[in-house]
Structures are given as C-alpha cells and as structure tokens.
Image (cartoon, rainbow, N blue to C red):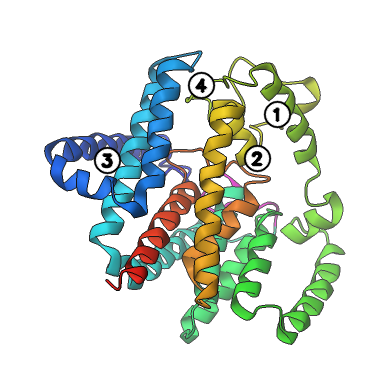
Amino acid sequence: MYSIDITKDTIAPLIFYMLMGGGLVFLLINPFQFKEVIFHKSFLFLLIINLINFVYLLFFDIYFNQESLEYLMARFVSFSLISLSVYYNFNYFKTRFPVHLINVIALVVIIGLFIDPFIFSGRYDGIIWNPNMLASISVIAFAFLFLKEEKTGFEKFLMFLLLLVVLSTGSRGVLIAIVLSFILKFGFSFRNIFYSIMGIGFVVLISNTNLDTSLNRISSQGLFNDRTDQFYFALETLKKELFTGYGLYEYSGMPENIETPEELEGLFLGSHNGYLSILIQYGIIFGGIIIMIIFRKSIQLINYFRSMEDLKNIYLFIIIYTLLAANFESLLTGINEFHTILFWFSLSYLSYSKFRNEHAI
C-alpha cells in the first residue's frame, strides 16, 4: 500500500502504525514465546542489528529525536514479527506464500493496466507512485514465476505480461534481475548463451525505436548515467559526518540539512545506493558492521544452498538481486518498503530453513 499512489499517504500509514503498535503489544504480553524465537540461532543476526541500533541511538546519534526512536522501534518490531512468522509458519512460506505473493502483485499490475493501458507512452507506473517501484515488484513476480519448475498456460501468459510491464517502466536495474533469473534457472549453459544472443538482438531492435523502455534508457543513457553524480555527492555528504553518521532517522541517503547542488535539483532523491545510505545513516564504524553482517549472512546462505543445488530457490534470488541492486537503489535501509522487507524476510526464512535442514527438523 505504500507503493500504491492513492494509498501511500492515507491507508498505508494507518495500517503500518497499527501493525507496529499491535506487534509491540503482542511481544510485551508474550515474553516467553517471544524470547524463544528472538534468541534462536537462525535469527541472531536480526537481534544483533537491533542491539546495534539501540547502542547507536543512545550514545552516537547526534540528532537524537522522536524520528530516530520511531525507526528503532519499527525496525525492532518488524524484525521480531518476521522472526515469529517464519518460525511458526514455515511450511506456509515454503509452499503457498510465493503463489499468494505473485497473485497480489499481478492484481496490482492488472488494475494498473485497466486504469492506464498505454504502457509504452512513456515511463509506465500504473497505479504505483514511482516507475522504479513498479519495476521492482513486477520483476520479483516475474522471477518467481520464471523459476517455477512447472507453469500453467495462464502463468506463462502472466509471466510475459509482467516482463512487458517491467521493461515499460524504463528501470535499468531490473535488467540485472532478468539476467540473474536466467542464470539461476539454467546456469552458464548453451541455452543461456543462446538466450543471451537473442537478448542482444532484442536490445538492438528496441533501442532503435522511440520508446522509453529499460532497454532504450540503457542504450541512450548507459546503466548508471545520473547515478554517478549522486554517488559522488553521497560520498561528499558522508565525509562531513564520517564516524557518527547523520542518525537513525536519516535512512534515505539524503539528510535533511544537506543542501542539494543546483545541477542535481529536481533529480536527487537520495544516495541511490543502499550501502552508502547505511554509512550515511550510521557512520563508517556502525554502518560497516551492519554491512558486514548483511554480507556474512548472505554469503553463508548462498554458499549453503548452492552446494545443495538449490539455486532455483526464489528467496535466494531475492537476496542476490537485492545485494546487486543496492549498488544503485536504497533497498536495505527502509522500514516499510516492499522490496526491503522481502529481503530481510528472505534472509530470515533461508536462515531458519538451513537450521531445519542441519537438524533434520
């Protein structure tokens, strides 16, 4: 709902605060049940991040305020609810959740097509407030369908429709997700080489049209283009508060008290880099620890499930794609962004899945 234009400032905040408040009350009245899960080996990395947030807020947040406290509490509750959900509903997330997730995303996309069917008239966003956001959620549904072993005729049609919508958004980063899904599906095989040759031909064909698709923007602007200027500006911003950062509430990568250069006016919305956003938020010491925890857990899970020849795992796709996409989007720091929550959920689910496999549960 935070992604949908008509609900992001109305219904979404109300539901978010109700969930966070209700979740906090639930945790307080079920301390023993909560303790069993939060200290579970699978979810310790989330507990450590929450402890880091607490220590940072108390001793290093130079702008200690209500917004930082709200971030601390929201992160704590969301991590706790993710842990509890995975622990008590593991089989649901293993079998039914991907289907439900695909259906919800498909519904949002189809409603958008009914309201605005002109997907190639510019950067398409449907009923989502931002084309990049639509691209992010649509490519996830596409990859989930693509990585399925068996697909119905309708699912194949839906997969093609989602691919068209993804390309029509003009997002360049989603091309990485599409390539990654092919690699996870087929590996470095002759089939992938063949598809790559077809893809290059398709890029050449589309880039010679007057459309504004992801392929056209890659062809005309390159992969990073304006992101480079924003990257260097974020580095300059970081240097001003190198060790302490700008505070927990400054997780967008663009602190409020920083003046935007004239050449970036109307363009700069943040660092557009998840790792830089973390460093700007926490400083290089605490931020470096957070990034190290993320990479350590991610690499551990990727290596484990790769050795089990389980690369088609849809949650593994989310982790790898997020780590790559975080180089040009802030996908690691938000507290209510769809892709961000799905990333933390995927880490938690696979961590608990690994524990169950090792202990034959």
Q: Which residues are magenta?
A: 121-130
- Is residue 359 located in the magenta-colored stretch of the structure? no
Q: Are marks 2 and 1 in contact (CB under 8 Å)?
A: yes
Which numbered marker is on residue 19? 3
**Mark drawn on residue 247:** 4
Q: Earlier in the sequence, mark 2 or mark 4?
A: 4
- Say which residue label 2 marks: 273
Looking at the rendering, which quadrant does residue 47 occupy?
A: top left
Say above or below: 188 vs 123: below
For badge 2, the amino acid type reads Asn
> Going from the N terminus, do you reach mark 3 or mark 4 first?
3
Magenta stretch: dominant secondary structure: loop
- Amino acid type, residue under disc 4 in the picture: Gly
Q: CA distance from mark 4 to mark 1?
A: 15 Å
Q: Secondary structure at mark 3?
A: helix
The earlier-in-sequence mark between 3 and 1 is 3
Label annotation for residue 234? 1
